[in-house]
Amino acid sequence: MPDLLPERFYRDPRLAWGAYAALAVLLVALPFLVDAGMGRSWVRILDFALLYVMLALGLNIVVGFAGLLDLGYVAFYAVGAYFYAILASPQLGIHLPFWALLPLGAGVACLFGVLLGAPTLRLRGDYLAIVTLGFGEIIRIFLNNLNAPVNLTNGPQGINMIDPVRIADASLRRPSEWLGVTLPGTHTHYYLFLLLTLAVIFMALRLQGSRIGRAWAAIREDEVAAEAMGINTRNLKLLAFAMGATFGGLGGGLFAAFQGFVSPESFTLMESIMILCMVVLGGMGHIPGVILGAILVTVLPELLRYIGPLQEGLLGRVLVDPADLRMLLFGLALVVVMLFRPQGLWPSPVRARELHPDNPDLVRQEQEALYDAER
C-alpha cells in the first residue's frame, strides 16, 4: 500500500508498522473518545462518515481512475438501499437476512451500472455528465411513483420498519454485549462499517495497482491513445461503471439497515453532488485524498451547526439562521479550496507534479524515484 503514508515511513519498515499500529488503536478507541468528548450523536456522524467513504471510493473508480464524469451516482446508492428495504421489511412481508441481501443488492447495483454504462460508451465530458444526471433523476422519480398499480416502494412516504443488521441473533440497533463489553448500537455499527470500509479500501488499492487500474489511467489521460495501444476501452469503461456501482449498492444496503427508513428524498441530485465534492476536494484518483475529502465533507457541515450557539454567546441573539449560514460557509470553503488547491487537499504525487512542475520537493521525489528505478 505505497500511497497511504508519507514516503519517509517506507524507508524504515518499523516506522511504517508503528504508524499502522497507532492508527489501528486510534480507530478502535475512536467511538469511545468521541462519545466521551462530544456526545453519542457524533458517533452516529462517524458512522455516516464511514458510509460516505465507501461511496466516495466507489465514485472515485469512475471519476478518478477512469476519468468518466458521473453525476448520477446516487442512483446506485438508491438501488442498493431500496433492494434491501423491499426485501427486509413489512412492505412485501419478506424478511431475508442482511448477509444475503447485502451482496445481492451490490450485485443488482452492479447490473444497473452496466445498464447505464452500455449506452454512454461513446459519450465524453459534459455529454456524459448530462446523461448520468438524467439517469439519477429517472431512478429517483421512478422510486417516487412506484406505488401504483403495485405498491412496491410506497411512493413519497418511503419504506419504514426495515430490518436491522443482525449478528448472532443480536440486533445492532440495540445495545449488545461483545467480549464482555456492552456497546450501544451506534458503536457496533461503527465497527461493522469500519470493517467494510477497510475491505473497500483494500479492493480499491488492489484495483489501482493492477493492469486494469493502469488501463483506466490510460483511458483517463487519453482515450484515443489508449485504444491505439490495444486497450479495450469499451469493456474497461463498462467495468469502471460496474465496480463503482457495486460500492454504491453496498453503501445503500448499509444505509437502509442503519436508518431503518428510506425515501426518495434521501437520493436527490444534491447527494450525488456532495459525493462528487468529496472526490474532487480530497484529490481525484488518490485514495487517501478521497478518504480525507469524504470525512471533511461529512463532518464540516455538522461542526458548522454550532454557529447558532456561537452567535448567541457572542452577540446575545441569533442574527442569521444557522441552517442557512452553515451551508453558505460550507460552499464558501469549497470555493476557496478549489481556488487555491485545484488539485485537491491531498492529491496523488503524479497529479501534483502535473499542476506544479517546479515544486522543488516534488522534483526531488521524482528524481529519487527515478534513481530507485535505475538501481
Image: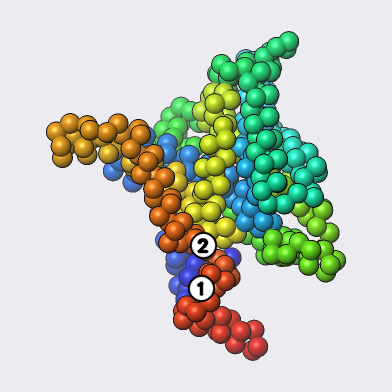
Mark sitting on residue 356? 1
Looking at this view, is 207 or 334 the one in front?
Answer: 334
309 in relation to 29, above or below: above
Q: Quadrant of residue 205?
A: bottom right
* Residue at the image point whose x is 70% and y is 46% from the top: 127
First in residue order: circle 1 vs circle 2 = 2
Which amino acid, mark 2?
A: Gln
Considering depth in this image, is 8 or 29 the residue closer to the camera? Answer: 8
Where's residue 53, x and y in %?
A: 53, 47
On screen, residue 142 above or below 190: above
Q: Is residue 283 above or below residue 331?
A: below
**On the rendered image, what quadrant is the C terminus found in?**
bottom right
Identify the residue at horizontal 59%, vertical 54% (top origin): 201
Residue at 65% over, 38% down: 133
Q: With 210 as the anchor, is 183 left or right in this view?
A: left
Residue 140 shows up from this direction: yes
Q: Amino acid at mark 1?
A: His
Query: What quarter of the picture does the N terminus occupy?
Result: bottom right
- State how far apart marks 1 and 2 are (Cα): 10 Å
Give the crowd class for mark 2: few <14, some 14-19, many >=20 residues within 10 Å. many
Please tell me how crowded label 1 is: few (under 14), some (14-19), or many (20+) other residues with Cα within 10 Å. Answer: few
Residue 62 visible in this rendered orientation of the protein: no
Q: Which residue is mark 2?
A: 343
| Numbered badge on residue 176 | none
- State left or right for residue 301 relative to residue 312: right
- The image quarter in which residue 65 lies: bottom right
Q: Are marks 1 and 2 in contact (CB under 8 Å)?
A: yes
In percent of width and height, residue 249 lies at 65, 38
